[in-house]
Image: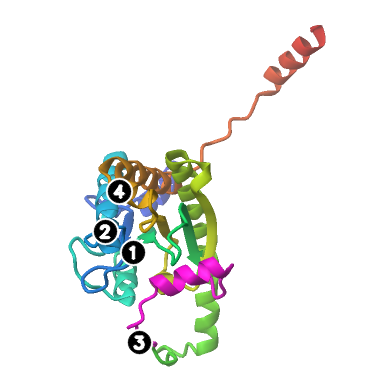
Amino acid sequence: MTLRHIILVLALCLPPAGVLAAPRVVVLDPGHGGTNLGARGQTVDVYEKKLALAYANLTATYLRRMMPSVKVVLTRTRDRYLTLTQRVRMANAAKAAVFVSIHLNACETHIQKGFGTFILSRQASDKEAARVAMKENDARKVRTQARKPAPGGRGPTVSSIMSNLRHVGAHTASVRLAASVQKALTRARGKALNRGIRQASFDVLMGLSMPGVLVEVGFIDHRKEGPELNTLKVQKAISLALAQAIVEHLSPPPRRTRVRPRVRKRRRRAARKK
């Protein structure tokens, strides 16, 4: 290949002058909002919708500091109602690289505590995952009818195959994202509160074209953990952990340096002398 050919190939690969690559987008989704109060805390004025927004705002602040090249988008920045379908559409329209829906858990007995991360699946991994999905899914969501064949001759079979292929890739990445979230939250809150990764049919994760998880950062109705989740200290610790997990997920894996043969021989000789 001549120098002229090399220059031509580079010119075709590089973007036009003045055109910069679009920044990667992270969508943070504060759960509930408006008339959808979510779970209630120990006191009357503490609701999931309020704390979820506080955690999302703090996480966004940390993300912008840690990764300035990333654009952070919140599905809601104030106390307003959004359907779960609207949240998914916003994430897809933004062409997000990551979607994280932030929630707070609750139970009838008020004795459970800890954090957990959930990924999308047609079947729930256990009763706990099914219960959380039922709590977080929007009862007012209207189920759509079966889709018509797309224009251009693409039938429902081809569409479903392509959708499944995209889902498999997003599901694998979602598992990695969930693992990063649980690892970061464990560092911040301790192993005893780690409830693990579960999967269920979450409406807010359906239809996403990117890796997405739903995080329950703790139990808002627990006698001890509930008030802790309402303190700025704990909110900062959890939000920082979420930001760290997202940065870890978006960062390229470290390169493995190969040991040169000469160095290996020297190490073997040194080992024999010992």
Which is more toward the observer, 11 or 98?
98
- Dots 4, 3 in contact, CB < 8 A: no
Residue type highlighted by circle 3: Val
Question: Residue 197 at what x, y percent from top left?
Answer: 53, 57
Residue type highlighted by circle 1: Lys
Q: What's drawn in magenta, residue-wise?
A: 121-143
Q: Residue at x 27, y 72 (%)?
A: 36
Q: Secondary structure at mark 2?
A: loop
Residue identified by numbered label 4: 59
Q: Residue at x 32, y 66 (%)?
A: 91
Label 2 or label 3, whichever comes before in sequence order: 2
Mark 2 and mark 3: Cα distance apart in space: 32 Å
* Quadrant in which the C terminus appears: top right
Mark 1 and mark 3: Cα distance apart in space: 24 Å
Label 1 or label 4, whichever comes before in sequence order: 4
Residue identified by numbered label 2: 43
The answer to whether 194 appears left or right of 7 in the picture is right
Q: Secondary structure at mark 1?
A: loop
Residue type highlighted by circle 2: Thr
Residue 142, numbered circle: 3
Residue identified by numbered label 1: 95
Estimate how packed mark 4 is, as few (under 14), some (14 to 19) or many (20 or more) residues with alpha carbons within 10 Å. Answer: many
Mark 1 and mark 4: Cα distance apart in space: 20 Å
Mark 1 and mark 2: Cα distance apart in space: 39 Å
Q: Secondary structure at mark 3?
A: loop
The residue furthest top is: 273
Question: Residue 47 at what x, y percent from top left?
Answer: 27, 62
Q: Where is 229 relative to 128, above or below?
A: above
